[in-house]
Image: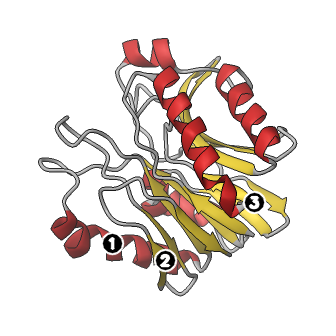
């Protein structure tokens, strides 16, 4: 499987602009013929948590957002995994969706390590793919003991969409290298599964800006490939 991790640069609260930017990035990376495109958490809205924002920007699954991505998956004949704000009858979720090249929704994962006003997911779901059994751990779920226990040793590949930022200056390459980079690798080692980790990128002049970058980590915690911190450079990896 050839995976392409896109640490998409986004404008929070501007889904139409972000979708168009994704269309352009998708056209750029199509030359690599990826089997799977991986996008960050809340890829087209940014990670929003105020009820007024969730009311405006969260959409149902299936719904408008998944229909747009499904059409792109069919057009480019690749699977796409992306995070989104989900509106459900019982509340809002930070969710991630895996769409097959046919446009079919193969997997919906709801983030487990969430706080109100979000609702929290209650399990980790796994789907069979051509590259093996695939699961999704959304951002903090990678470090959440309950989520990790639910995953167990049942998957071959885990996609980890992030919307991770630093307090204060973000991006911060020195802090990334000192604190965060190895922490992700260590967490993956406890899972003993190949991890595809991809973070959103936001305007660094804004508070709590996600810091971009992507990495692939082996089941033994070795960093196999990575894109530069603070960028939306695509990371292409043959798993």
Disc 1 on helix, strand or loop? helix
Label 1 CA crowd tier, 10 Å (few <14, some 14–19, many 20+): some
Between 180 and 13, the one nearer to me in the picture: 13
Asked whether the beta carbons under mark 1 and mark 2 sit within 8 Å of each other, the answer is no
Tell me, for residue 225, which label it has, or none.
2
Question: Residue 182: where, in percent of width, then height?
Answer: 34, 77
Between 28 and 177, the one nearer to me in the picture: 28
**Which residue carries the number 3 mark?**
35
**Which residue carries the number 1 mark?**
181
Disc 2 on helix, strand or loop? strand
Q: Quadrant of the N terminus?
A: bottom right
Disc 3 on helix, strand or loop? loop
Q: How many marks?
A: 3
Quarter assignment of residue 193: bottom right
Select label 1 or label 2 by which is in front.
2
Label 3 CA crowd tier, 10 Å (few <14, some 14–19, many 20+): many
Of callouts 1 and 3, which one flags the residue occurring earlier in the amino acid sequence? 3
């Amino acid at each position: 499987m050839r995976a392409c991790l896109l640490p998409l640069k986004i404008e929070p609260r501007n889904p139409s602009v972000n979708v168009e930017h994704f269309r352009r990035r998708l056209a750029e990376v199509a030359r690599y013929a990826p089997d799977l495109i991986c996008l960050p958490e809340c890829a087209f809205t940014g990670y929003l948590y105020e009820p007024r924002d969730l009311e405006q920007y969260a959409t149902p699954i299936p719904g408008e957002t998944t229909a747009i991505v499904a059409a792109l998956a069919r057009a480019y004949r690749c699977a796409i995994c992306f995070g989104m704000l989900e509106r459900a009858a019982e509340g809002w979720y930070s969710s991630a969706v895996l769409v097959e090249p046919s446009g079919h929704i193969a997997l919906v994962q709801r983030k487990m390590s969430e706080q109100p006003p979000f609702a929290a997911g209650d399990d980790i779901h796994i789907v069979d793919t051509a590259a093996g059994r695939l699961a999704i751990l959304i951002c903090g779920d990678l470090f959440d003991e309950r989520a990790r226990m639910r995953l167990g040793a049942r998957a071959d590949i885990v996609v980890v969409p992030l919307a991770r930022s630093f307090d204060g200056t973000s991006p911060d390459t020195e802090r990334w290298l000192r604190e965060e980079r190895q922490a992700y690798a260590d967490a993956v080692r406890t899972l003993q599964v190949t991890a595809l980790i991809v973070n959103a990128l936001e305007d660094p002049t804004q508070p709590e800006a996600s810091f971009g970058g992507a990495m692939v980590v082996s089941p033994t915690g070795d960093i196999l490939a990575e894109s530069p911190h603070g960028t939306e450079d695509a990371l292409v990896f043959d798993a």
